[in-house]
Image: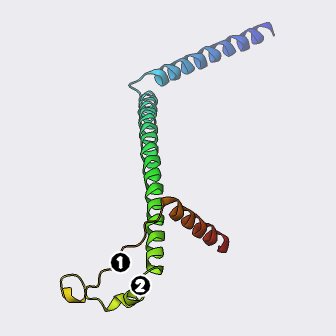
Amino acid sequence: MDIVIDLAIALGAIIAAAYCLLLSRRLRALTRLDGDVGRAIAVLSKQVDDLTTALRAAEQQNSAAGTALGQQITQAEAAARRLELLMAAAQTSRQNAPSHLEGAQDIPAYGTDHAAFAPMRPAAPRSQDDLRRRVIRQRDHAGASR
């Protein structure tokens, strides 16, 4: 009986040694860079580095574009304010136009007939504050009707 137990222990030790040898070979093949899996790991690692670099470059471009867009928005808002003032000035000059200019559609285009040109008398100069107040009033009125 002792011999059978010794043989079973020896057989178990041989099987364990063979399994350790097999695992050792697989681990060595996995860590080698010229193998398929090792090559794939190296390629993936390089791609992660490249993507990190590309992400940093995209973030820098995004911040530069955001800054440029902010400047363009500021310029557009200033232009919109100027246009509102010009529109208000045009409306007030149209309302204050003399009665003989009411039919301005009858006046031909420039260069066709100079005899039909009827000069307007110069309007009294208005201050910028009056125009701004009028634009603000119109803007508030338009915002209330929405």
Query: Which of the 4 quarters of the picture holds residue 89?
Result: bottom left
- Residue name at image x 55 percent, y 16 percent: 21
Q: Describe residue 138's horizontal placement relative to residue 54 as left or right.
A: right
User: Real-space Cα distance between discs 2 and 1?
Assistant: 8 Å
At label 2, the amino acid type is Pro
Q: Amino acid at mark 1?
A: Arg
Mark 1 secondary-structure assignment: loop
Tell me whether circle 2 and circle 1 mark residues in contact (CB < 8 Å).
yes
Q: Residue furthest right?
A: 1
Using the image as rendered, state which of residue 65 and residue 92 is in the foreground.
Answer: 92
If the image is split into quadrants, where does the C terminus sit?
Answer: bottom right
Residue 98, numbered label: 2
* Quarter of the rendering occupied by the N terminus: top right
Looking at the image, residue 144 lies above or below residue 4: below
Crowdedness of circle 1 by 10 Å Cα count: few (<14), some, many (20+)? few
Name the residue carrying label 1: 121
Residue at left 47%, top 23%? 29
Please tell me the numbered disc located at residue 22.
none
